Image: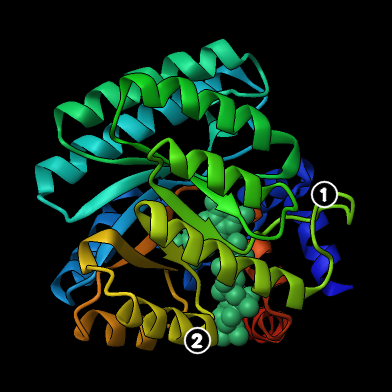
C-alpha cells in the first residue's frame, strides 16, 4: 500500500510543486547529491577518488512547459561541459520527458541531437533512462533514430515489463549498450509482472542474454543477483570490458566499494537538481523501511 501511495505521490505535479516551494528536503539528500551542479560535482569527485565512476542526472521529468524543457536541455549541456572541464570520470543520464517528449517529440529529438553532438565532441556517453510504460515505445523509437547517427547513446530496459525479453533480444542484436534494471514505476499487470519473484527471474535471465550479445550495465543493489551474475561471468569467461555494475547514489555504498575493489567497473547514478520529489518518492516506494527513515527525519526537524 505504501509503495502505491509513494508512486502515486511521485507523479503528482502539485505535490512536487508544493515540496519544491515549501518542503524541506525531507531526507531526500540521502539519495540526491544536492540541488546545485557544484554539489553533484563534489559528490562525483569523492566517488572517483574511491575508484567509482558516475553518471550525472539533472533531475526533472514529465515536463509540460516548453520553457522547462529548454531549461532541462541547457542543464544537460552544462553538465556535459562540467564533466569535461573538471575531468570527471562520469557520463550523463537523462529522461526524455524532461526534454519535452510529451509536448512535441520533434522538439525532444532536436534537444537530444544537440546534447548528443556535444557529448560526442567531448567523447562522453549519454544514457536515456526508461520511464513509465506509456513512454517505453516512444523512447525506444527515438533511441533507434538517434543511434543511427550517435554511437554514444544507450538506453535502459526494465525487467518487470513483459515486452522486455523481446526488446533485449532485438536491441541487443542491433548493438545497443543497455542498462538493465528491475523497473521503478507503477504498472498494470497486463504489461508488467506483478510478482517480485517473476521480476527477479526475468532480470537474471535478461542480464545473461545481454552479456552474451553486447555491453551490459547491470543496475541493481540485489546482492543475490549480483552474486549469481559474478559466478556466471567467471564461468563464461566474460571480460571486464563487457559490463559494469551500476547503483544509485546513497544506496549500498559498501557493496559499490567492494565490487570496485575487486576490480569490476562500478558506476554510481548521481542525481541533482531542484526537481527531486518524484525521484525521492520512487526511492521510498522501493523500500518500505525508508518510510520510517522519512518519519524520523521529519520528527527531527
Ligand atoms: P530490490 O528492490 O530487490 O532491492 C535489493 C536490495 O537493494 C534491497 O534489499 C535493499 O537492500 C537495497 N535497496 C533497493 N532499493 C533501495 C532503496 N530505495 N533504499 C534503500 N535500499 C534499497 N528504474 C527505471 O524504471 N528506469 C531507470 O531508468 C532506472 N535507472 C536506474 C539506474 C540505476 C543505476 C539503478 C541502480 C537503478 C535504476 N532504476 C531505474 C531503478 C530500478 O528499476 C529499481 O527500482 C531499483 O534499482 C531497486 O531495485 P533493485 O534492483 O536494487 O532490487
Q: Quadrant of ligand 1?
A: bottom right
- The picture quadrant where one finds residue 123 is top left
Disc nearer the start of the sequence (2/1): 1
Does the numbered disc 2 mark a residue whose Cβ is under 8 Å from ligand 1? yes
Expressed as whole percent of the image width and height from the top left, the position of residue 277 reads: 63, 54
Question: In this picture, is 100 found above or below 161?
Answer: above
Residue 191, label in figure: 1
Expressed as whole percent of the image width and height from the top left, the position of residue 136 reads: 66, 37
Rendered residue at 28%/65% (across/down): 43
Within 10 angstroms of label 2, few (less than 14), some, or many (20 or more) residues? few
Residue 162 is at least partly visible in this image: yes
Task: Between residue 143 and residue 256, name the one nearer to us.
Answer: 143
User: In the rendered view, does 29 fall on the left or right side of 280?
Assistant: left
Rendered residue at 61%/24% (across/down): 101
Look at the image and tell me in which quarter the C terminus lies.
bottom right
Q: Which residue is mark 2?
A: 223
Question: In this picture, is 184 found above or below 225?
Answer: above
Expressed as whole percent of the image width and height from the top left, the position of residue 92 reads: 34, 44
Task: Between residue 19 and residue 72, name the one nearer to us.
Answer: 72
| Count of numbered circles on the image | 2
SS of the residue under disc 2: helix
User: In the rendered view, does 98 fall on the left or right side of 134?
Assistant: left
User: In the rendered view, does 13 fall on the left or right side of 131?
Assistant: right
SS of the residue under disc 1: loop
Rendered residue at 85%/64% (across/down): 5
Rendered residue at 34%/82% (across/down): 235
Could you give the CA–CA distance between mark 2 and mark 1, rounded to whole angstroms? 26 Å
Amino acid at each position: 500500500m505504501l509503495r502505491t501511495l509513494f508512486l502515486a505521490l511521485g507523479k503528482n505535479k502539485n505535490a512536487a510543486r508544493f515540496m519544491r516551494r515549501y518542503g524541506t528536503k525531507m531526507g531526500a539528500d540521502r539519495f540526491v547529491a544536492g540541488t546545485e551542479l557544484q554539489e553533484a560535482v563534489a559528490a562525483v569527485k569523492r566517488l572517483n577518488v574511491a575508484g567509482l565512476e558516475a553518471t550525472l542526472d539533472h533531475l526533472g521529468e514529465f515536463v509540460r512547459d516548453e520553457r522547462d524543457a529548454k531549461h532541462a536541455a541547457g542543464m544537460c549541456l552544462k553538465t556535459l561541459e562540467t564533466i569535461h572541464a573538471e575531468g570527471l570520470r562520469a557520463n550523463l543520464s537523462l529522461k526524455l520527458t524532461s526534454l519535452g517528449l510529451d509536448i512535441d517529440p520533434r522538439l525532444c529529438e532536436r534537444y537530444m541531437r544537440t546534447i548528443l553532438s556535444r557529448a560526442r565532441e567531448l567523447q562522453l556517453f549519454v544514457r536515456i533512462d526508461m520511464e513509465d510504460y506509456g513512454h517505453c515505445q516512444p523512447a525506444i523509437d527515438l533511441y533507434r533514430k538517434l543511434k543511427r547517427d550517435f554511437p554514444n547513446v544507450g538506453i535502459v530496459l526494465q525487467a518487470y515489463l513483459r515486452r522486455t525479453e523481446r526488446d533485449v533480444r532485438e536491441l541487443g542484436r542491433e548493438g545497443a549498450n543497455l542498462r538493465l534494471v528491475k523497473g521503478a514505476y507503477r504498472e498494470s499487470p497486463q504489461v508488467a509482472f506483478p510478482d517480485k519473484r517473476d521480476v527477479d527471474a526475468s532480470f537474471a535471465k535478461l542480464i545473461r542474454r545481454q552479456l552474451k550479445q553486447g555491453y551490459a550495465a547491470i543496475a541493481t543493489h540485489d546482492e543475490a543477483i549480483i552474486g549469481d551474475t559474478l559466478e556466471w561471468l567467471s564461468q563464461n569467461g566474460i571480460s571486464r570490458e563487457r559490463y559494469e555494475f551500476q547503483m544509485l547514489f546513497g544506496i549500498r555504498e559498501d557493496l559499490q566499494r567492494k565490487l570496485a575493489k575487486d576490480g569490476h567497473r562500478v558506476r554510481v547514478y548521481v542525481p541533482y537538481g531542484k526537481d527531486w520529489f518524484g525521484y525521492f518518492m520512487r526511492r521510498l516506494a522501493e523500500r518500505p523501511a525508508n518510510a520510517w527513515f522519512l518519519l524520523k527525519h521529519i520528527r527531527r526537524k
